[in-house]
Amino acid sequence: MNENYIKKLIKLVEDSEIESLEVSSWGRKIRIVQRMALSGNGTASGPVVVQTTAPAVQAAPAPAPAAPVAEAAPAADDSKLIPITSPMVGTFYSAPSPDADPYVSPNQKISVGQIVCIVEAMKLMNEIECEVSGRIAQVKDENAQPVEYGQVLYIIEPD
């Protein structure tokens, strides 16, 4: 993402009433958050915070609080799993067309950049790519079902 593009995104957030905007392109993500604060004259001013992330591996979920010794072993296995979440509200499609095979299935090995599904939003088909290599441990959604922003679509067991 170039500097002019980022400036346009910041201007878009400043000129609108949205609180945040997240854009990903070529494995890079940028998130712009507008924090509304009252200034001395009682009007709202919106400084913009920009966060960027490299195309690295998604962070694993935070480990659960300490459990009794008898339950410690199962919790350790779950901490290695990485979710693939929906980047937007839309409709989840596991295959490119109704009569085609799904992009991925449980226990299938996948690699970075491999398409795992499509999320349709406003008649646009957005291909969702995997950001880590590993194995599909779990498919969380059914084909042609609505999904929310941040909803877990797949659980990946990384290599």
Image (cartoon, rainbow, N blue to C red):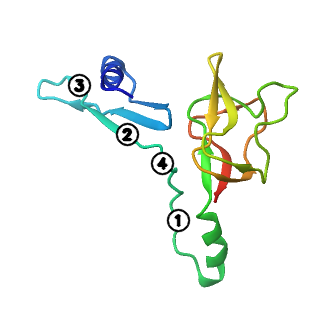
Return the residue at label 2: 52
Disc 2 from disc 1: Cα separation: 24 Å
Name the spot of residue 147 as percent of width and height, x first. Answer: 66, 34
SS at badge 1: loop
Mark 3 closeness class: few <14, some 14–19, many ≥20 residues within 10 Å: few
Mark 4 closeness class: few <14, some 14–19, many ≥20 residues within 10 Å: few
**Marks 2 and 1 close (CB-CB < 8 Å):** no
Give the residue type at disc 1.
Answer: Pro
Return the residue at label 4: 56
Give the residue type at disc 4.
Answer: Ala
Task: Looking at the picture, tell me which residue is in the foreground, 137 or 14.
Answer: 137
Task: Looking at the picture, tell me which residue is in the foreground, 9 or 43.
Answer: 9
Disc 4 from disc 1: Cα separation: 20 Å
Give the residue displayed 67% in from the left and 72% down from the top.
74
Task: Looking at the picture, tell me which residue is in the foreground, 2 or 30.
Answer: 2
Give the residue type at disc 3.
Answer: Ala
Name the spot of residue 75 as percent of width and height, x first. Answer: 62, 70
Name the quadrant containing residue 145: top right
Of the two numbered discs 2 and 4 in the rendering, the one whose residue sits closer to the viewer: 4
Name the spot of residue 110 as percent of width and height, x first. Answer: 69, 48
Return the residue at label 1: 63
